[in-house]
Amino acid sequence: MLDECLEALITDPKGIYVDGTLGNGGHAAAILERLETGGMLIGFDRDVDAIERVKGTLKSGGGKRVELVHDNYANMAEQLDALGISQVNGLLLDLGVSSFQLDVAERGFSFQQDAPIDMRMDRTQGQTAGELVNLGSEQELADIIYRYGEERASRRIARAIVEARGKKTIETTLELAAIVERAKGGRRGKKTHPATLTFQALRMAVNDEIASIESVLKSMVGRIVEGGRIVVLTFHSLEDRLVKQFFKRHVPREESLQQGGVRRIGEEPAVQWIWKKPLVASAAEQAANPRSRSAKLRAVEVGV
Ligand SMILES: C[S@@+](CC[C@H](N)C(=O)[O-])C[C@H]1O[C@@H](n2cnc3c(N)ncnc32)[C@H](O)[C@@H]1O
């Protein structure tokens, strides 16, 4: 859905655009390519490895400026202030984890490769998923696995984790995956690994992902120029619900008054949906890129 993202995002090729989730730099490079002299790209990632890797490819030049910021996008407004930028023309968020993060075993995101259970996007701070798994209470683990994984066996899994760590600290991703697999009664012929939802839940908890999304939307919606866009690609129903409900509150609607007549309500600034329903990946894209199967693309324009 790269083309759809860019079509929705870029309304003025000389404008200022923020990619809040640089990752492998694919979207950012495509944005930069579409910008003209005077345009600016500001890229964020809380993973310093992502910043280091894209630095060489995303360069200022041809009258276009590039700024890369290593920080949580929850702090975007403050970082823009530090750059002396009060408003931007567009914001793109491609949520979740990058293929690079998943592929590097030592980052500890994947149950397919053995490594210490880390899962922090920003390895310079915060609790690792290993610490959470070994120190969190059974109730806390069950709640996280249920809330962020929407995993029905959350209590059983939390109990199995607590039992296992009572015998020996759970050190690696494969140890954890095996505990979850046993708690769920094995693979039972399913294609997806039984630990998929548990790993996703721990990752979302360790990185406080839902709260960060809420913060960036709240702090940035008022910093988009009239006619500018916010484009968000989600991969999880909780993320999509949050994004949908957030924008819904900003879409003006009419309320009937008791004394007759109507009044317009809705939070400021007003936004309008670019598409009534979220876009999903085509069958061809889903076949080529399995991650796109759960992708939903939503976009709004600021102003009425
Ligand atoms: C799905 S990838 C983005 C892929 C990117 N659009 C591309 O074309 O390669 C998500 C990236 O967002 C980063 N990320 C996730 N949450 C973040 C946050 N709260 N603040 C900053 N970066 C975040 C991750 O570290 C990861 O590199």
Image (cartoon, rainbow, N blue to C red):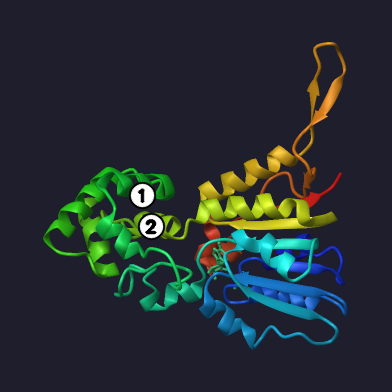
Mark 2 and ligand 1: say if the CB distance to the nearest ligand atom is below 8 Å: no
Quick one: which residue is furthest to the left in this view?
A: 167
For residue 301, above or below residue 268: below
Quick one: which residue is furthest to the top in this view?
A: 259
- SS type, badge 1: helix
Residue type at tag 2: Leu
198 relative to 83 in the view: left or right: left
Q: Earlier in the sequence, mark 2 or mark 1?
A: 1
Q: Are marks 2 and 1 in contact (CB under 8 Å)?
A: yes
35 relative to 248 in the view: left or right: right
- SS type, badge 2: helix
Residue type at tag 1: Ile
Q: Nearer the viewer, residue 258 or 292?
A: 258
Instruction: Say which residue appears at 61% left-offset and 67% top-offset.
Output: 21
Q: CA distance from mark 2 to mark 1?
A: 7 Å
* Camera sees residue 134: yes
* Camera sees residue 279: no
Mark 1 and ligand 1: say if the CB distance to the nearest ligand atom is below 8 Å: no
Instruction: Say which residue appears at 73% left-offset and 51% top-offset.
Output: 221
Quarter of the rendered image showing ligand 1: bottom right
Picture quarter with the C terminus: top right
Residue 39 quadrant: bottom right
Residue 259 quadrant: top right
Residue 154 on image: x %, y %: 31, 46
According to the image, label 1 marks what residue? Answer: 145
For residue 99, above or below residue 54: above
Circle 1 packing at 10 Å, graded few (<14), some (14-19), many (20+), is many
Residue 228 on image: x %, y %: 82, 57
Q: How many marks?
A: 2
Instruction: Say which residue appears at 60% left-offset and 59% top-offset.
Output: 74
Residue 185 on image: x %, y %: 21, 51
Q: Which mark is residue 202?
A: 2
